[in-house]
Image (tube, rainbow, N blue to C red):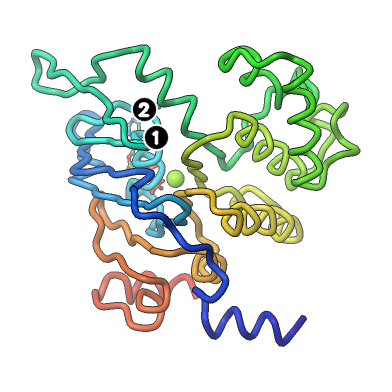
Amino acid sequence: PAAASVTVLANPHHDKPKTAEKPAVAVHGIHKRFGPLSVLNGVDVLAKRGEVVSMIGSSGSGKSTFLRCINLLEQPDQGQIVIDGEEIQMKRAANGRATPADRRQVERMRSRVGMVFQNFNLWPHMTVLENIIEAPVQVLKEHKAEAIDHAHALLRKVGLSDKHAHYPGQLSGGQQQRAAIARTLAMRPKLILLDEPTSALDPELVGEVLRVIRQLAEEGNTMILVTHEMQFAREVSHKILFLHQGKVEEEGAPVDMFNAPRSERLRQFLSRTR
Ligand code: ADP
Ligand code: MG
């Protein structure tokens, strides 16, 4: 096992799945302000199918806002979002801001983009199984029996088969996050956004969640991951973006970003986090 992990570290791209050429997500020129505060100042991100793109950057640099713009939990003021070949239609309001033009398209796109939050966001009054089948049944109109079968398969995948009847409050943070990942997967998303999925966990629970995320990466899921787990980002990512004050300050392959950062800001950021 030790030798295997050395191989992975020496050549982080060694066992990553090949990616097809068509982008799963193409985001261009995203701007977002909150009142006087300009949070995103023209962010571009491109991820091909099967790619993992990690976003790093200081607290307040706009990482969460960017993810929330991609699945339209926030409305970007400007910019283009294309997911799985379909562009989100925007219209320009009287104040000059762009807003999504078609509610039904927004609903459809949202159901294709999964989001995993720092604080799990499971419904506390539902069992793990009920949490997982809720959206497939309500939104995708899956038959309940089919959704339950799928949920059990996903629970096996994340190592929670024996917890299906538990309520979130009866689980550890690591178990809750794995259940939240299973819930996201139940929607068969084209793109998975993960916003600091291990930041709320006690250190001893981080590994079990990272293992699941690594497995998703190896299975070829397209993901955008915001994380402070630098070693992990380096191992699973095809590309790293460093966000600074709402702009992509630097991007590149993990080996270049971490071993040979070009910008002084990235150098400083990395020296603070190592
Ligand atoms: P990060 O995830 O990189 O820490 P965020 O995207 O959460 O950064 O926040 C970027 C900036 O936007 C911060 O200054 C934050 O206070 C501000 N911000 C985020 N959401 C809102 C909001 N809904 N209203 C006002 N300001 C916000
Ligand atoms: Mg954040």
Could you tell me how many numbered marks the image carries?
2
Q: Residues within 10 Å of mark 2 (few under 14, many from 20)?
A: many
Residue at the spot 24% in from the left edge and 49% down from the top edge: 44
Relative to 80, 4 lies left or right = right
Relative to 124, 85 lies left or right = left
Residue 143 vs residue 108, the one in the foreground: 143
Residue at the spot 61% in from the left edge and 38% down from the top edge: 119
Image x and y of residue 58, in percent: 38, 58
Image x and y of residue 261, in percent: 31, 78
Q: Secondary structure at mark 2?
A: loop
For the residues bearing labels 2 and 1, Cβ distance under 8 angstroms = yes
On-image quarter of the N terminus: bottom right
Image x and y of residue 231, in percent: 55, 71
Relative to 155, 78 lies left or right = left
Judge whether 71 appears above or below 267 on screen: above
Q: Is residue 122 visible?
A: yes
Image x and y of residue 234, in percent: 49, 70
Kindly identify which numbered label has been placed on residue 269: none
Q: Amino acid at mark 2?
A: Leu
Residue 116 vs residue 212, the one in the foreground: 212
- Whether label 1 lies within 8 Å of ligand 1 gets the answer yes
User: Whereabouts is ligand 1, in terms of quadrant?
Assistant: top left
Q: CA distance from mark 2 to mark 1?
A: 6 Å
The part of the image, by quadrant, that contains residue 265 is bottom left
Residue at the spot 62% in from the left edge and 20% down from the top edge: 135
| Residue named by callout 2 | 72
| Residue named by callout 1 | 68
